[in-house]
Image (cartoon, rainbow, N blue to C red):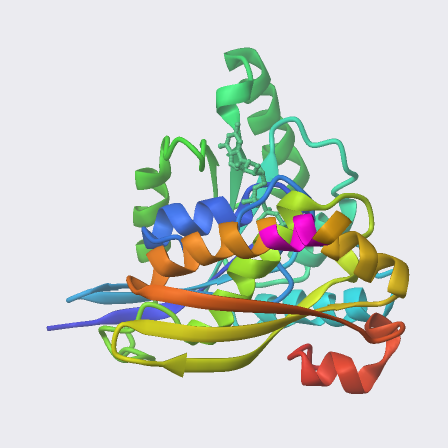
Amino acid sequence: MSHKAGFVSIIGKPNAGKSTLMNALVGEKMSIVTPKAQTTRHRIIGIVNEPEYQIVISDTPGVIKPAYTLQASMMNFVEGSLIDADVILLVTDIQEKYDESDVIEKLRKTDSPVAVLINKIDKSTEAEVKSKIAYWEETLHPQAIFAISALHEHNIAAVMPFILGHLPEHPPYYEKDALTDKNERFFVSEIIREKVFKLYEKEIPYSTEVIITAFKEEAHINRISAEIIVERDSQKNIIIGKGGSMIKKVGTYAREDIEEFLQKKVFLELFVKVIPDWRKKDNYLKRFGYEH
Ligand SMILES: Nc1nc2c(ncn2[C@@H]2O[C@H](COP(=O)(O)OP(=O)(O)OP(=O)(O)O)[C@@H](O)[C@H]2O)c(=O)[nH]1
């Protein structure tokens, strides 16, 4: 029996709905989804496995002009994901307010087949959809254009045949029962980071990193310790909140989701640590997994 396998990269502006689309395609809550821009920092790989094919999907950080070292390193992931992709899915919010010319520039340089996915059509009229389709036809001449709602899983089924049509014959790259190449610790830190994104405002989420410092698996409970890293004492105070009220909320919400994810009882301990200007320091970026 012939087998197809290949790499699909999802790219687009911050908040366009890339993570939501990947979750819809992979069918599991794989990368974190929040209403704030730039929550996806790493390349996350989700894998769709069927007897006759294996699709490896990367969800990339939103394309932005880098303002500091962390963002420059985030953009390296995007460049890398365009080079090794068999299929590129460009996700664009139908109400996009950002200038998308930098994304379009990147795509003009690639030889891989591109589909434009006009997302969030649940928030628009038919006339808006038609005019957006015409715009993308004209601007990029992609191999295909789909009008979708990733959140409501509308028209997602149409994307699969496009992907499969462009996937080369190839043996599987990963074990056929693999869902992702990231480990449980990674997802646990992502869940905690998601709560930080949801509970704090302004620059706080962007100044934060979460490190899992202990992960002990016992028969009926996992004991997990994590550090929330911030850049300044003032941010530490905000993270902790009055009498520890805020950090308690982070801990409670995160623990509930981690228990659901691991299907096990969890004891979660959180610490807040200040590392001045960690986002500008190469050694910390490296340690936190942002290759440079
Ligand atoms: N109404 C509507 N909202 C959507 C749809 N798809 C995604 N969203 C919402 O848009 C927001 C951003 O979605 P994400 O999937 O996190 O976007 P992203 O492109 O991965 O964002 P970054 O990781 O910041 O680059 C979330 O609040 C989603 O629920 C959709 O089809 N319709």
Is 50 drawn above or below residue 2 in the view shown?
above
Quadrant location, ligand no. 1: top right
Q: Quadrant of the C terminus?
A: bottom right
Q: Is residue 45 above or below residue 287?
A: above
Residue drawn where x is 79% and y is 69% of the image? 70
Q: Is residue 131 left or right of residue 57?
A: right
Q: Is residue 52 visible?
A: yes
Magenta residue span: 244-248
Whether residue 262 appears in magenta in the rendering, the answer is no
Q: Residue furthest front?
A: 243
Most common secondary structure along the magenta stretch: helix
Instruction: Please state the horizontal and vertical placement of residue 106, each as a whole percent of the image.
Output: 70, 58
Image location (x, y in percent) of residue 128: 59, 17
Quadrant of the image for the N terminus? bottom left
Q: Measuring from the top left, give residue 234's x and y in whole percent.
A: 89, 58
Q: Is residue 167 visible?
A: no
Place of residue 156 in the rendered image (x, y in percent of width and height, measured from the top left)? 36, 39
